[in-house]
Amino acid sequence: MSLAFPDRPPAQHRTEYYGAFAFGSVILTCFLSFVVARRISGEDWQVAATFTLGGLYAVLGILGDSISARLGRHGRTINFAVLCVIVTVMIFVSPVRGFFGIIVLPLVSQAIFDFNWKVALAAGGGLFAASVSVFGYYFGPRAIPEAAMSYTAAFAFTAAFTIITKQALNARERAEKLRHELEGANAKLRAYAAQAEELATTRERNRLAREIHDGVGHYLTVVKTQLDAAAALFATDPALARTNIDKAARLTAEALDDVRRSVGTLRTDAPRPPLPTAIQRLAAQGEPPATVTIQGEPRTLEPAAEHALFRAAQEGLTNIRKHARATHALLALDFRAPACVRLEVSDNGRGRPDDAPESGGFGLTGLRERIALLGGTVECGNRLEGGFALRVELPTPPA
């Protein structure tokens, strides 16, 4: 007998040993009737046949899982059908009547466990009919109702107990499957959490790197320009050299303020003047001088948008002062489009060398990342009239 689930390999049925024990116990109980019965009406061949069939029935029932596995895809069905034939012949041949009929009950349980309800109902009905008809065959039709009443309780109890057991085992299987799935989901969640934490750390590092490069890098470039100029003028024009040194000192103080905003608070909404004012101040720092043009009516933007545009202007001017060898720069801020703001930083310098990478250095890479996070675009390249231009377009719903 196999109290198991059809979707699992036969060798792994968790109820195999329990089913085999129950099967063997019922067979042993039935055959004890030959020992305790005071009188057995029957011939010797019937006793021999009953014991022979009983032994075969026990072997096929107890070792059913292994035998079915060897028979292939339909092995379970074949084994069950053979058991039904054997038990039917055995109860008709057996010289012991009455209690011996419960030997069919393990097959009722097996039908419920291993097959769908239609097959189980047909098998149970057939076994019930065989058990009852034995009495009609030997004792006449009058014995059938009494036998039916006696076996109905046994069959009903077996079916009910088997269904309850099967449901309990199925529930246990589902609970164990859910537990494994939950453990797997928890493991994935832990992995995702670790990845999210690593990603958040990487993003914050990149943000800090952009802030330091765009802020401190810009100021250091301008300070170096002023100090270089002061060194060149110190012998011939000490007053002008002093002016350049004072400007470098002032820019150093502004750089410290920018560091406090960028590293200390790490907030894009740190207090800052309005964008046009901030850009005009930015243009006045360092050489070459930058002309600022404002097109359209300036409007207040979201802090993140203003911060990104300010950093874009810083990056453009820093590159001009470091690489362009320009005599003039232009910084244009365009508010005319209602849904976006455009910023262009251009110069009349030498432009980008032919062997320079198209993507630019770390500054342009960080600028693209910063603008992309806000849904904007960055374009840059040499101008037809000479020099270089950096163009930024940022969608900017009103703050």
Image (tube, rainbow, N blue to C red):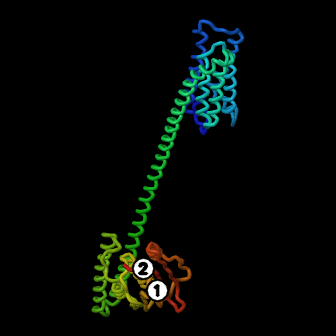
**Quarter assignment of residue 148:** top right
Seen in the picture, residue 258 relative to 144 is either above or below; the reply is below
Left or right? Give the position of 182 relative to 68.
left
Foreground of the two, 279 or 251: 279
Q: Secondary structure at mark 1?
A: helix
Which amino acid type corresponds to the residue marked 1 in the rendered image?
Ala
Nearer mark to the viewer, of 1 and 2? 2
The structure residue drawn at horizontal position 50% and vertical position 89%, both measured from the top left corner, is 387
Determine if residue 316 is in view.
yes
Q: Position of residue 322 (x, y in %)?
A: 43, 82
From the image, which quarter does the N terminus lie in?
top right
Q: Secondary structure at mark 2?
A: loop
Left or right? Give the position of 129 relative to 387.
right
Whole-number angstrom distance, CA of label 1 to CA of label 2: 30 Å
Foreground of the two, 72 or 217: 72
Which residue position holds label 2?
396
Which residue position holds label 1?
324
